[in-house]
Image (cartoon, rainbow, N blue to C red):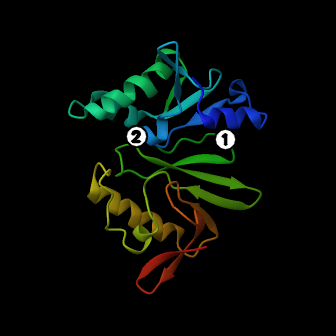
Amino acid sequence: MQGPFLADLASAGFPRESIDTVLCTHLHVDHVGWNTMLVDGKWVPTFPRARYLMGRVEFAHWRDEQGRDDMAAVLADSVAPIAAAGLADLVETDHRICDELSLVPTIGHTPGHVSVRINSQGEEALITGDFIHHPCQIARPEWSSTADTDPREAHRTRERMLGELCDRPVLVIGTHFAGATAGHIVRDGDAYRLAV
């Protein structure tokens, strides 16, 4: 079974076998759903030669969680087959992937949530993952998504990250932002906003 994403990847000249690293900011279904694909009734790794980087804390939390049948299903079809194939690398929340890529702990949305810092040719960007779901949370960091595991910690993380990013030349790339998906965090009175 091959979805439109995989067909687009292949038509752009990227066969599945050419992907060598997959990074999961956290283990919610919308961030791990393409880890695997259903082939002859069995979930198999989508990218068979890739190392799948998953947070050690994140993995342990959801593996041991007993009260979330939805997460048990996600682990069963999108995470466990990766581990069973020996392709999962459990990493710390501040893991350095290479000179240009490193993880930033942004917990609260989930217990081991990370964002991705990119440094290249003197410029910097940050892929948010889900520590901010919508630009309104830049102005109102106390607003939490219903998907936040720990809303108080998620709020503290947003406050900390907004303070660190404010008025710096860091391109912030919102994973779930609709419309303009990237910009810079700037002060707006006593709050912050995304300058596109």
Label 2 sits on what residue type? His
**Residue that appears at 60% across and 64% down:** 182
Q: Closer to us: mark 1 or mark 2?
A: 2
**Residue that appears at 46% across and 77% down:** 192
Indicate the position of residue 134 as horizontal and vertical percent values: 44, 63
Residue identified by numbered label 2: 28
Residue at the outermost top position: 40
- Give the distance between the C-alpha atoms of the residues marked 1 and 2, in whole angstroms: 25 Å
In the rendered picture of this protein, how many numbered marks are placed on residues?
2
Looking at the rendered structure, which numbered label has been put on residue 98? 1
Crowdedness near tag 2: few (<14), some (14–19) or many (≥20) residues, C-alpha within 10 Å: many
Viewer-side residue, 61 vs 194: 194
Indicate the position of residue 5 as horizontal and vertical percent values: 62, 37
Classify 76 as above or below 125. above
Classify 71 as above or below 134. above
Viewer-side residue, 38 vs 104: 38
Crowdedness near tag 1: few (<14), some (14–19) or many (≥20) residues, C-alpha within 10 Å: few
Label 1's element?
loop
**Residue that appears at 27% across and 59% down:** 152
**Marked residue nearer the N-terminal end (1 or 2):** 2
Label 1 sits on what residue type? Cys
Label 2's element?
loop
Q: Is residue 31 left or right of residue 151?
A: right
**Residue that appears at 60% across and 72% down:** 168
